Amino acid sequence: MHEFVVAGVDDLPGVVSMVGYRSFGLPVGVHLGVPSGTVTFILSLDGPVLGADCAADVAGGRLDRADVLLAGLHDTATHVVQPARQEGVQLALDPRAARALFGLPAAELPQGIGDALSVDPRWRRLLEAVGETSDWGRRFALVAGEVRRRAAEERSGPRPETAHAWTLLARSRGTAGIDDVARAVALSGRQLRAEFRREYGVGPKQAARLMRFEHATARLAAAVRAGAVPSLAEVAADCGYADQSHLARDVRGYLGLAPSAWLSQERRNIQAGGHSQRREWAT
């Protein structure tokens, strides 16, 4: 059984999406954490999240673990052990909110499976409070309250130019020209690259590529949920790729799989509601 419950986050600062998940009775396997333009934050309520940067480390038992997972921007898939039973709350966060929520720029967050408790042990209290109720509405309210408290406490944020540059890239879903973005924020290309990487851990070109990929995978997943066969050529054209082969190369580069293989592997998760962090990007 798979269950995904999506919370409303329109008025929640820095939160792109919040999803409650619960599953049991599934075959044990490995799930790919897909790269995206968001920071990942997970409260795992049924044992720690286990995983590694590559399949070989998973097979060899060399696993990272986190009850409260925190992962910054990364450009390769994370290999996560999918147990027979799991439960938790997962947030996709705007990287511009990293300083407010964690006291660090997104560039200093772990790229793989990092433990948020090593950044700030106060998250333990939230994990315990969320675990004391099984009601999704109550769980979401607890998480939202903590996010709002932290956002109100911490006033620091990215440099305005890098924050606006991120806005422009996200608004275009990764298709804006980097030179155009630099001009719009009154920085040279070199300055933009340096400041952007210092804040987010990736350059603007890498961030744009992640956003474009996130848009494409959202489109592919939405087609599967609708019971349709995704058109790679159509998705590629709509998401700013040169052609279908360009999209397929990006999928292989990020996930190590052909698009059809990834969709087949993730079909059960997708049909249950997974891979729907930015619902507005599914169109």
Image (tube, rainbow, N blue to C red):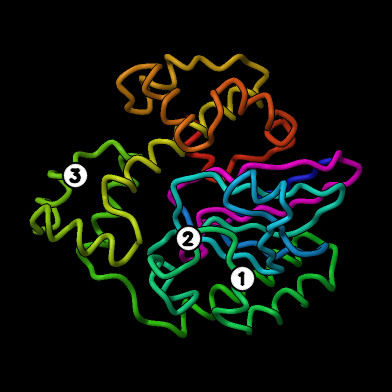
Q: Amino acid at mark 3?
A: Ile
Above or below: residue 53 compared with residue 115: above
Which residue corresponds to mark 2? 72
* 272 left or right, relative to 13: right
In the image, residue 259 lies in the stretch drawn in magenta: no
Sequence-wise first label, 2 or 3: 2
User: Would residue 226 be found to the left or right of residue 172 on screen?
Assistant: right
Per the image, label 1 sits on a secondary structure element best described as strand
Mark 1 vs 2, N-terminal side: 2
Q: Position of residue 32 (x, y in %)?
A: 62, 42
Secondary structure state at the residue bearing disc 3? helix
- Of pointers 1 and 3, the one earlier in the residue sequence: 1
CA–CA distance in space, label 1 to label 3: 33 Å
Name the residue tied to disc 3.
178
What is the spatial separation of the Cα atoms under label 1 and label 2, in whole angstroms? 11 Å
The residue nearer to you, when weighing 207 against 174, is 207
In which quarter of the view is residue 64 placed?
bottom right
Q: Work out whether residue 10 or residue 191 is closer to the camera in this orientation and state it.
A: 191
Q: Nearer the viewer, mark 1 or mark 3?
A: 1
Q: Nearer the viewer, residue 154 or 244?
A: 244
CA distance separating discs 2 and 3: 22 Å
Which residue occupies 59% across, 23% down?
A: 223
| Residue at the limit of the structure toward the right, as seen here | 25
- Relative side of 113 to 132, left or right: left
Numbered label attached to residue 14? none
Q: Are marks 2 and 3 in contact (CB under 8 Å)?
A: no
Q: Which residues are magenta?
A: 9-37
Q: Residue type at mark 1: give it.
A: Asp
